[in-house]
Image: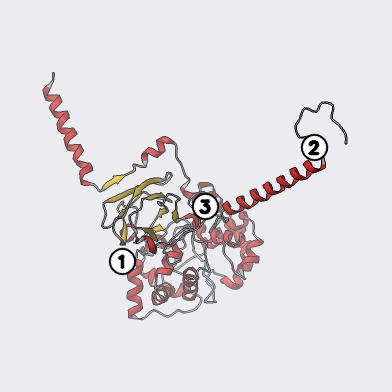
Amino acid sequence: MNWRKLRTLFLWAFALSLIPATRYYQIDVPLLHFLRGHHVDPLSLHLAGEFVENNLGTEQNSDGSVTVRMIAQQYLFIPHCIVVPVGVPVHLRITSADAVHSLTFNGTDYAVKVLPGTVSQTQLQFPKAGDYKTVCREFCGAGHYAMRSEVKVVPRDQFPALQPGERGTCAAQ
Amino acid sequence: MLRNNRSASAANLPRPKAALTLGFTLLVTLAACALLLQAGASPPDRVPSNVAWTPETIAAASSGDAFRGLLLAKRCGHCHGDEGFSARASTPNLAGLNKLAIWKQLEDFRTQKRLSHAMDPIAASLSTRDEAEVVAYFSRLPVFTDPQDNRAFPQSRPDQGHAAIATHLVSFGDGERGIPPCQACHGPVAYRPGVPSLMTQNTDYVLIQLEAFANGTRTNDINEPMRTIAALLTEEERKALAEYYGSGLGLQSGSSTSPK
């Protein structure tokens, strides 16, 4: 039994395991999606498919939860202003049109890595109402430091009743 | 009534009463199906532009012959100027602009994703190949270091306040509202594919386009960046930016013009 080797291994394992503790709580490692074969074409998101313009935003699901679809691109999150109800599960589906971004919400510890070519899917919940700024936390180019958007979390009675084909958004356009 | 010898079927259709009932049921079922399908049918997708920057598209748009483009562009000089600098404030300068940027706009005019009374018939008469040649020509027209040489007519500099506002937006954007710096996409720091340089552009044209993006008249930006940004800017900021670019302030602070 080579105790020295075992000790070295143990120390390396311990040191490397500290790295995740220093990061934001990263959910849904999108790299795995590639292995499972889930691909979207980042260049043609606007032409057809799930991430066309009129399908972005908040969709009401029949079980009370909402699904939010977003695109991250240099240097904006689209739609720029999202509205979700407080306290319900939010299924977030986001993909990138170009570089690697990371969607984080100020005031929470959620961070969602967004890769081009695959869809990051995760579930969030906002227990408190209010306006949350979203910030990109993965360097994506010259405009990275100004890449922000907004999430408005509203009480359920203020959340608009959405039709099946309608998507909620509070963007200026 | 004909009797079918092999008839083991329970339908026995030749009877008029049964036929009517069956027909009626079928009609009601079809109507119900049509209604249900219509209720679930989603509205058509809203596509901003038919252009996608795949390697094939980029290759097709960048491989035009500039000499053929010169011949095709003879009639463009009426509005856009013989040297690519337009004498009309509301018509854009095209000299030295990135090939992909002009090509995308021509394609959008041709496919009616961007509407313009002047450009629609012209773009309709050009094929994709012709467009590549025309843009190759315009991208090779020279631009100069002195801003006044890049305009067919002098355009006034912004006042102190507007210059400060515009310089800040161009260099840093606004993190509070989430507006990225203009220079990260429009240059000189970086040029995104299909995004035009603004440093040699006319003031009024920039202002008209920013306002068109802001009020939703122009919608051909892929994934809505310009519509979002223009709507977030105030009217004064849009004016300041138009004056900044139109007077060539951007050119003086930048080190190079856009990549061809």
**Percent x, y for residue B101?**
50, 60
**Percent x, y for residue B182?**
38, 65
**Percent x, y for residue A36?**
42, 35
Q: Are marks 2 and 1 on the same chain?
A: yes
Q: Are marks 3 and 1 on the same chain?
A: yes
Q: Are marks 3 and 1 in contact (CB under 8 Å)?
A: no
**Mark 2 or 3: the one toward you:** 2
Q: Which mark is residue B13?
A: 2
- Residue B190's image quarter? bottom left
Identify the amino acid type marked 1.
Glu
Looking at the image, residue B29 lies above or below residue B74: above
Identify the amino acid type marked 2.
Leu
**Mark 2 or 1: the one toward you:** 2
Q: Is residue B106 left or right of residue A119?
A: right
Colour logic: secondary structure
Total marks in image: 3
Residue A4 in view here: yes
Q: Earlier in the sequence, mark 3 or mark 1?
A: 3
Q: Nearer the viewer, residue B201 or B26?
A: B26
Report the chain holding disc 3: B
Q: Which residue is mark 3?
A: B52
Q: Earlier in the sequence, mark 2 or mark 3?
A: 2
Looking at the image, residue B160 lies above or below residue B195: below
Under circle 2, the secondary element is loop
The residues bearing labels 3 and 1 have C-alpha atoms spaced at a distance of 31 Å
**Percent x, y for residue B54?**
51, 48
Q: Residue at x 46, y 48 (%)?
A: A42
Q: Nearer the viewer, residue B150 or B172?
A: B172
The residues bearing labels 2 and 1 have C-alpha atoms spaced at a distance of 75 Å
Q: Residue at x 13, y 28 (%)?
A: A7
Q: Which residue is mark 1?
A: B176
